[in-house]
Amino acid sequence: MNRDTPVWLRLGSLVFGLLFLVLPLPTPFDTLRPHLLALALIYWALESPGRGGMALAWVVGLLADVVAGTLLGEQALRMAVLVFLVQRFRAQLRFFPLWQQSAAVGLLLLNDLALMTSIRLIAGAGLPGWGQALAPLVGLAMWPWWFLLLDALRLRHRERAGGR
Amino acid sequence: MIHSGSPAPKLSEAAAGTLPLLACITLSAVLMVADHRGDLSPKLRGAISTAVEPIWRFAALPAALWRWADTALSRQQVLAEETVELRRELQLRDAQLARLEAVARENQRLRALLGGKADFRLAVQMAGIVDVDLDPWRQRVRLDRGSAEGVEVGQAVIDAGGMLGQVVQVSEHGATALLLTDASHSVPVQVVRTGLRLVAVGTGKSDSLRVPNIPQSADIREGDLLVTSGIGGRFPAGFAVGTVRAVGADDTRLFLVADVTPAAQLDRGLEVLLVMRGDIDVEIGPPIPPGYVDPAPAAEAGPGEAAAPPPTAAEPAE
């Protein structure tokens, strides 16, 4: 399985996800920012399961904490839980049609939102604004495109590698 | 949906997933608590910050490119007009500055007459705001100067309008500043008109501050200008914080609460000034508290001034 997933694509999508956390966007979109890092982690947990998936998610989440300036450990926890759930239900999720998969991703992100909100409430920050509350819907709408994009990139690499 | 219809995984498989998860949760919880209490994180965060610095720089690139293209491609006529406009403004400012200098000189002379400490010098350092969107829950900005350029945690950040916030975390070539309007930030202030001392706290919205727990008898009204009082020694005294927009009774009806419009341009502008920390000049701003012992010998004015405090103390006594 690892042979099929190029390292640069894996790393690239994660770095892009980190970058996208803080990329300045015009005003209506900056609160509706899709959490591409979470989507990338979901994708890689689905497509190439490995032993270190959760540890990787935790480390990347920690980096995300520093990049976005959140409480150190918050995103690390969220990403680890996300990857854990995906790994747990991988057998079902993987063979869902795309729309059903999007719905599942929406649910995963809803869980993520609940986790984030509870962490922040415990830490003494307020309730999320409407932009953050819509994050699961944004992720749900974003998932098919993200999935198809990463799949296409991965398949193209595999074809090229096979041709050689 | 997630819970229904999934066959129970084998025990070993479940354990293989659950144990790392538990480890992750524990580790995260420890980190979060430590970070929230502020125990270990400055160093740890600083170290990781240096590692992720390229990401911030890279994220700011598109906006920088856009600005560059905007300048490079805008028409010459527009630029010429802008230059004329700026030159006119500069002249105006120069004139104002000249007047200010005269006032400063007069002030210095008067201080010399009174025998007080004369110097009120403001050493500042310019820093750019790295154009990235940090966590929307908190009011923070990323600056492009760090410990290598002499930035320290606790430095006050100002702009042309007034107080902007303070530096809370520093890495090698960058720093994070907490804005006045963050919900966890508060700053000691003073009403210019009456000398009343208060504390302004952030609301989490970039266009308003709150001043809670004002005694009913306090003299504060709409339009009052608030400046930093310098109490606590964190912020230098005398920087504009904001103007009072509205005053009303709070929920308990025992105290007043004021809404304040910040003086600084919190959500605009790309350059800020970092105030270098020197000795904070205690002669400027509020009177010295009675228990204060100045390390310098010139502290005789202290108790005398403290005998005539502004009308109301900061603690709501009602």
Image (spheres, rainbow, N blue to C red):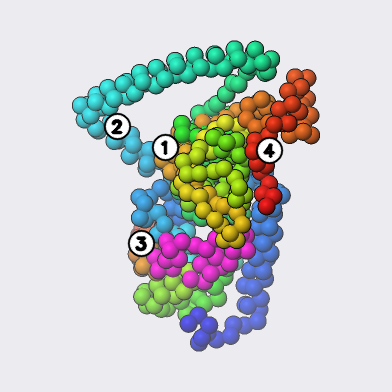
The vertical placement of B58 against B254, above or below, is: above
Q: Nearer the viewer, mark 3 or mark 1?
A: 1
Q: Nearer the viewer, mark 4 or mark 3?
A: 4
Q: Residue B235: percent from the left, percent from the top?
A: 62, 35
Q: Which numbered dot is residue B269?
A: 1
Residue at 50 percent across and 50 percent down: it is: B247
The vertical placement of B267 against B251, above or below, is: above
User: Of label 4 and label 1, which has the lower sequence position?
Assistant: 4
**Mark 2 residue type:** Thr
**Mark 3 residue type:** Leu
Residue highlighted by disc 4: B232
User: Of label 1 and label 2, which has the lower sequence position?
Assistant: 2
**Mark 1 residue type:** Gly
Q: Nearer the viewer, residue B318 or A71?
A: B318
**Mark 1 neighbour density, 10 Å: few (under 14) some (14–19) many (20 or more):** few
Q: Which residues are magenta?
A: A110-139
Cα distance between the residues tagged 4 and 3: 55 Å
Q: Which numbered dot is residue B71?
A: 2
Q: Secondary structure at mark 4?
A: loop
Q: Residue B131: tell me if it is visible.
A: no
Q: Secondary structure at mark 1?
A: loop
**Mark 4 residue type:** Gly
Q: Residue A23: percent from the left, percent from the top?
A: 42, 49
Q: Main secondary structure of the magenta part?
A: helix
Q: Which numbered dot is residue A149?
A: 3
Whether callout 4 and callout 3 share a subunit is answered: no
Residue at 62 percent across and 60 percent down: it is: A123
Image mark 1: chain:
B
